[in-house]
């Protein structure tokens, strides 16, 4: 769904003064890159930002030490309690439906319906109130989607409770069954962060347009045109590849229920004294974004299950990237 922000961008395109081309200090405002799609975000139901892997101290023990408790925000480990199985059942995936059923009396897991007036993915608060006593709780942004806390100096120590992407150097994880008994563990690394493709606020950079129909794009997201999506007919695709490890952690935090597409908010940046060209730097991104389109999903698009005696979580993270293809038709 295109939202109001897309109309605002189109208005800017049609009303920007072409005479700016005569001014060296302002001519870059006319560059087409200021008006195309620049970022993608991932979101889910608002209440889910306090559940799933966001929960604090819900397990029986941590670091394989029985009865140690899960203090200090679980020692920076990604910890998930699987309501779908017991240790006697064998290894298991993180089954979202089991979590929904277990907590259904108090947990509304349905994402908000999209509206053309939306300026964010979830209109309700997406703050993790589990961390309200954390010393840098005031640094938690309420953006309506998953942030990338691993890149925020104030929040990197609790990335495992804020979600949903591991640090570039990786992290350990622990899975527990529904009774709180230790089940399995391992290590996991975010492709997005290892390759500096996403900033601290969770905006995944969109690469340059590719004149191909190939769905493979290892750098996160790309605009694609070609015979399947002929730009001459007003069609374009935005391919979003989510690496197996990033897909696995997104599931652990409650999966993806929204995808957001953004352009640069040129007016806001100019008003702030920031003039183009606007470069991309994941560690210090000064771009301001405007939501222009969103997709809302009721099912879990990152569904996985056990296979070959291995946990579905492990199978999932070792598979090829998951592809979201958003077809944009401007006719």
Image (spheres, rainbow, N blue to C red):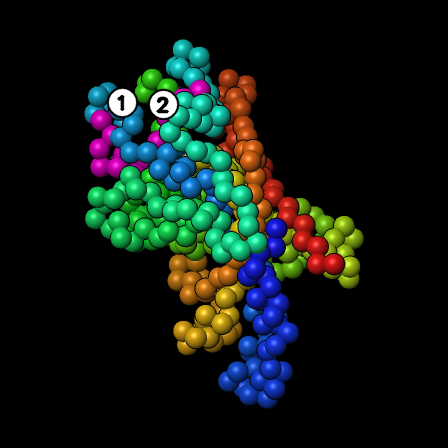
Q: Where residue 129 appears, x then y in whole percent? A: 30, 42
Q: Where residue 245 appears, x then y in whole percent? A: 48, 38
In the current view of this chain or complex, which residue is farthest to the bottom?
A: 22
Q: Which residue is mark 1?
A: 60
Circle number at residue 291: none
Residue at x 31% of width, y 48% of height: 156
Residue at x 54% of width, y 28% of height: 304
Examine the rendered structure and indicate whether residue 325 appears above or below residue 318.
below
- Please indicate, yes or no, whether residue 258 appears anywhere in the rendered image: yes
Asked if labels 2 and 1 touch by Cβ distance under 8 angstroms, the answer is yes
Q: Which residue is mark 2?
A: 176
* Label 1 neighbour load within 10 Å: few <14, some 14-19, many 20+: some
Which element carries disc 1, helix, strand or loop? loop
Q: Nearer the viewer, residue 185 or 241?
A: 241
Residue 45 among those drawn in magenta: no
Which element carries disc 2, helix, strand or loop? strand
> Of label 1 and label 2, which has the lower sequence position?
1
The span shown in magenta is: 69-84
**In the picture provided, is 320 more to the left or to the right than 87?**
right
Q: Where residue 260 appears, x then y in whole percent? A: 53, 51
Residue at x 48% of width, y 44% of height: 43
**In the picture provided, is 200 more to the left or to the right than 21?**
left
């Amino acid at each position: 769904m295109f939202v109001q922000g897309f109309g605002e961008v189109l208005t800017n395109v049609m009303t920007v003064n072409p005479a700016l081309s005569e001014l060296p200090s302002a001519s870059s405002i006319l560059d087409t890159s200021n008006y195309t799609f620049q970022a993608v975000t991932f979101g889910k139901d608002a209440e889910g930002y306090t559940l799933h892997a966001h929960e604090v101290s819900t397990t029986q023990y941590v670091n394989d030490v029985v009865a140690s408790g899960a203090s200090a925000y679980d020692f920076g480990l990604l910890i998930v309690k699987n309501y779908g199985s017991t240790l006697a059942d064998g290894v298991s995936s993180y089954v979202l439906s089991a979590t929904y059923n277990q907590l259904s009396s108090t947990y509304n897991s349905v994402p908000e319906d999209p509206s053309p007036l939306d300026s964010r993915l979830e209109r309700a608060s997406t703050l993790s109130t589990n961390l309200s006593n954390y010393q840098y709780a005031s640094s938690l942004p309420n953006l309506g989607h998953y942030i990338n806390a691993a890149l925020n100096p104030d929040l990197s120590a609790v990335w495992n409770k804020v979600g949903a992407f591991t640090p570039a150097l990786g992290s350990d994880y622990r899975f527990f069954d529904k009774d709180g008994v230790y089940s399995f563990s391992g290590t996991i690394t975010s492709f997005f962060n290892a390759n500096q493709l996403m900033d601290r606020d969770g905006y995944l950079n969109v690469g340059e347009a590719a004149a191909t129909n190939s769905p493979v794009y290892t750098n996160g997201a790309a605009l694609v045109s070609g015979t399947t999506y002929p730009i001459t007919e007003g069609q374009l695709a935005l391919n979003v590849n989510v690496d197996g490890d990033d897909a696995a952690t997104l599931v652990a935090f409650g999966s993806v229920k929204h995808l957001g597409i953004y352009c640069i908010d040129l007016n806001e940046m100019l008003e702030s004294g920031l003039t183009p060209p606007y470069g991309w730097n994941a560690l210090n991104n000064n771009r301001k974004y405007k939501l222009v389109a969103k997709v809302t999903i009721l099912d879990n698009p990152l569904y996985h299950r056990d296979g070959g005696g291995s946990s579905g979580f492990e199978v999932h993270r070792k598979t090829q990237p998951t592809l979201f293809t958003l077809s944009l038709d401007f006719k």
